[in-house]
Image: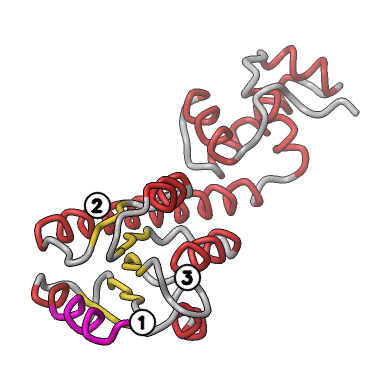
């Protein structure tokens, strides 16, 4: 099956099977693991989908796995499941980015809503990562001189000001500026500024150190 997958991590066999049947009945791919260690060992961190995670498990609890995933740079959305309500645990899990915290036995409508929200978030995160990767590749295609001109352009400096700052001719600035716009596949300074912001480039000109 193709498409996103809901990764169910629960040490209770009956709960795990029930959740998998429930998710599969919704027409969504589902895979189950009886422990956090099994999930980590399977190397699913870069897959498209979300995680349905039990709070209390032996060896490694749900919150402990959440912490490990954060440290590993995983952005896969997490839905926590618990047989009892724990305000402190819930608050901490949500603070660290969990999408929802559902009590067992899980209400089917609540579960479906949480999964839909999680999969949409995962799709948005993946789109942002893809865009960021593309922007990085565009930026890397610039020569050092083109990059320097770009850092002046995004501050709002005119071509003649950039030329004076860099000790080059206005014509040379225009050529570099045109190549920057071409390589970054944009047509306006506004687009250039937006792209640089996304790339984490300071909008205050080159470092004078």
Q: CA distance from mark 3 to mark 1?
A: 10 Å
* Image vertical order of residue 102 relative to residue 179, above or below: below
Mark in front: 3 vs 2: 3
Q: Quadrant of residue 67?
A: bottom right
Question: Mark 3 vs mark 1: which is more N-terminal?
Answer: 1
Residue named by callout 3: 61
Question: Mark 3 vs mark 2: which is more N-terminal?
Answer: 3
Q: Position of residue 113 (x, y in %)?
A: 16, 54
Residue occupying image coordinates x 61% and y 37%: 180
Question: Mark 1 vs mark 2: which is more N-terminal?
Answer: 1
| SS at mark 3 in the image | loop
Q: Position of residue 202 (x, y in %)?
A: 67, 29
Asked if the stretch drawn in magenta spans residue 190, the answer is no
| SS at mark 1 in the image | loop
Task: Point out the residue furthest to the right here.
Answer: 209
Q: Position of residue 184 (x, y in %)?
A: 54, 42
Residue named by callout 2: 117
Q: Position of residue 68 (x, y in %)?
A: 56, 66
Secondary structure of the magenta portion, mostly?
helix
* Image vertical order of residue 205 relative to residue 138, above or below: above
Q: Would you say the residues marked 3 and 2 are in contact, meaning their CB atoms lie under 8 Å apart? A: no
Q: Nearer the viewer, residue 48 or 202?
A: 48
Residue occupying image coordinates x 91% and y 29%: 209
Q: Residues within 10 Å of mark 3 (few under 14, many from 20)?
A: some
Which residues are drawn in magenta?
A: 12-21
Which quarter of the rendering shows the N terminus?
bottom left
Residue occupying image coordinates x 79% and y 21%: 169
Q: CA distance from mark 3 to mark 2?
A: 24 Å
Residue named by callout 1: 11
Q: Which mark is residue 94?
A: none
In this picture, residue 157 sits left or right of residue 44: right
| SS at mark 2 in the image | helix
């Amino acid at each position: 099956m193709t498409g996103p997958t809901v990764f169910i991590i629960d040490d209770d066999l009956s709960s795990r099977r029930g959740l998998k049947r429930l998710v599969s009945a919704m027409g969504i791919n589902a895979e189950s693991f009886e422990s956090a260690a099994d999930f980590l060992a399977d190397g699913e961190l870069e897959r498209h989908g979300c995680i349905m995670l039990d709070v209390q498990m032996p060896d490694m609890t749900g919150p402990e796995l959440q912490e490990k995933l954060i440290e590993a740079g995983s952005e896969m959305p997490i839905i926590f499941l618990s047989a009892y309500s724990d305000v402190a645990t819930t608050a901490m899990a949500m603070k660290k980015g969990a999408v929802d915290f559902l009590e067992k036995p899980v209400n089917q409508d609540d579960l479906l809503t949480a999964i839909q929200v999680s999969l949409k978030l995962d799709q948005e995160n993946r789109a942002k990562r893809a865009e960021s990767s593309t922007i990085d590749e565009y930026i890397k295609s610039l020569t050092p001189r083109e990059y320097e001109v770009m850092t002046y352009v995004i501050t709002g400096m005119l071509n003649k000001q950039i030329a004076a700052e860099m000790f080059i001719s206005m014509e040379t600035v225009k050529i570099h500026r045109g190549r920057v716009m071409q390589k970054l596949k944009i047509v306006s300074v506004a687009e250039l500024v937006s792209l640089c912001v996304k790339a984490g480039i300071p909008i205050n000109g080159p470092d004078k150190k």
